[in-house]
Structures are given as C-alpha cells and as structure tokens.
Image (cartoon, helix red, strand yellow):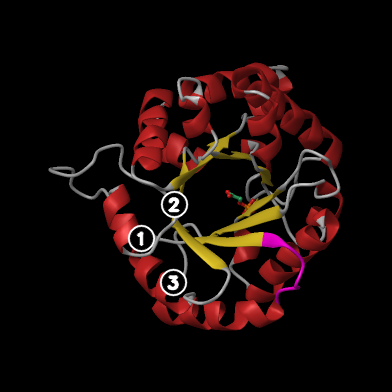
Amino acid sequence: MSRPAVVIGNWKMNMKIKETVDFIVKLPSMLSQSQGRVCLSVPSTLLKVASDASRGTEIEIGSQNVSQFESGAYTGEVSTTMIQDSGGQFTLIGHSERRMFYHEDDEMIKEKVYRAILGGLAPVLCVGETQEQKESGQTEKVLLNQLEKAMGSLNENEASAVIVAYEPVWAIGTGHAATPEIAQEVHSVIRGFIREKWGEKNAFRTPILYGGSVNPDTIKELIKMPDIDGALVGGASLNVESFAKIVNISRETKS
Ligand code: PGA
C-alpha cells in the first residue's frame, strides 16, 4: 500500500484575481483520474476568490503564512479564523523565505504550527538546510532540530495533522533540485523522526513532500522514491500546464 501523492503549488507573491480564476477553471479537466491531492497555496488576497472558483472541484486552497495569535492588535497579520472564513484549509508554515526575510524563528514557527492545528488548519511545516549547512555535513542535525522545535511537543493526534515539506534552501528557485537519492535519504530521516516520536501509524500516514526546483522533468525520478510523497512547487506552479503535469506524474507514479 502506498500513500497518495500530495502536490501543493506555492504561488508566493504572484498572481492576481483574473489569473487565479483562469488557472482554477482550467486545471480540473487537465488532471488525471488517479488518486491524489492537489492544493494551491495562494496569497491572502486570493484566498476567497480561489476557494470560490475551486468549489465543487478537488482543488484544496490554503495560505502561505498564518499568525501565531488568535486575533487582536497585530497589524498586517492574518489569523486561522480569517483564512478559514475565506475558504482556506491549510497553511504553509516556516517557509525558508519567511525564516530568512521575516526572521521567523523556531519558537514562532512552533507557535504557528500549534495555532494552525488549534484553528483547524492543516500545517504544512517547511524545513530545510542552507548550502553552508549542507557543505559542513550538518543537514541531518539541522533538520532534526527544526522538526523537534516546531512539532516535538505535539501529541500524537496533533502531530497527525502535520504535512512536512523538505525544502533544501540551496535548491529553491535555483534550477538545481536535490538528487532523488539525497532527497530520499533526508525524507527517510524525517519519517524516522515521526516514527520515533509518535509511532509507525503516524509515520506511515504523514505526507512528506519535497520542494526546490520541482518541474515536470525533475519530478519524474524524485517521485519514484519511497519516502517522497509529493511536492511543494514554486515557480512551476504558476503555469497551469506545467503544474498539471507535475500533479499527474506524481499521481500516476504513486497509484
Ligand atoms: P521553486 O520553489 O519550486 O521555485 O524552487 C519551491 C518553494 O519555495 O516552495
């Protein structure tokens, strides 16, 4: 038995209302019938229009960030309730661009993961090492530390809501995806962490996605790896044809 593929498009700070509707109207008829989840992580301004446009389809809509607070005087922030009110079902948390440019640290990421679960949003927890950390042989240590800090204190039930995305920082937007062998090795470390903390059932059920220069070519070999359950796709998710191809290749390989 294998896990169904999960592919999430991360639009980052791109797309407007009309482009969003066009994309979502086109996508469903381009998808193969094989089993799998297809999700779009959109800018907050597009949550409502994207979820309205995808109603009645299999497309799931989520945000790219969430506040660690419930509500109140936090200018510029978006809460779990607001995301859900706009039709969002999940949220990315701890993307390396958030860690880098907005100084999100492990403590904040932990609070966001917990807040998302409490608020009924599935957290897609992003972890990954930098080029420097990779070169000094610290990949495993860095990842285990990020995982422990962000989700280590969750109970079994809470942990089962989490989707993990391994995104090596050196592979994001560079055109150089991790080799399938390197990614598999890291994914199996992540699954091992989950197994050790919450047992085999959670380890088996948790989707672990790879992200970083995924496109219709690089996905082919990556998705064959046993512990790679899907992808978090940046640049290639902005084009509906290439995104549909990535979803279809992933689904067909995993089913
Ligand atoms: P990329 O981005 O596919 O453009 O490399 C992935 C991500 O940052 O989620």
Residue at horizontal 27%, vertical 56%? 82
Q: Residue 66, image x and y in percent?
A: 35, 46
Q: Are marks 1 and 3 in contact (CB under 8 Å)?
A: no
Is label 1's Cβ within 8 Å of ligand 1? no
Q: Label 3, label 2: how many angstroms apart (C-alpha)? A: 13 Å
Residue 147, image x and y in percent?
55, 25
Which residue is disc 1 drawn over?
44
Residue at disc 2, secondary structure = loop
Q: Name the mark nearer the viewer: 1 or 3.
A: 3
Image disc number at residue 50: 3
Mark 1, other Cα within 10 Å: few <14 / some 14–19 / many ≥20: many
Residue range of the region highlighted in magenta in the rendering: 31-36
Question: Which residue is under mark 2?
Answer: 64
The crowd level at tag 3 (other Cα within 10 Å; few <14, some 14-19, many 20+) is many
Return the mark for residue 9: none
Marks 1,2: beta carbons within 8 A:
yes
Mark before the other along the chain sequence, 1 or 2: 1
Eyeballing the image, is 212 above or below 69? Answer: below
Q: Quadrant of residue 193?
A: top right
Query: Would you say 58 lies left or right of 92 here?
Result: right
Name which residue lies at 40% across and 77% down.
Answer: 17
Mark 2: few, some, or many residues within 10 Å (few <14, many ≥20)?
Answer: many
**Residue 33 inside the magenta-drawn segment:** yes
Q: Amino acid at mark 1?
A: Ser
**Alpha carbons under labels 1 and 2: distance apart:** 8 Å
Q: Could you tell me which secondary element the residue under label 3 belongs to?
A: helix
Amino acid found under the numbered disc labelled 2: Gln
Q: Using the rendered view, name the quadrant where residue 133 is placed.
A: top right
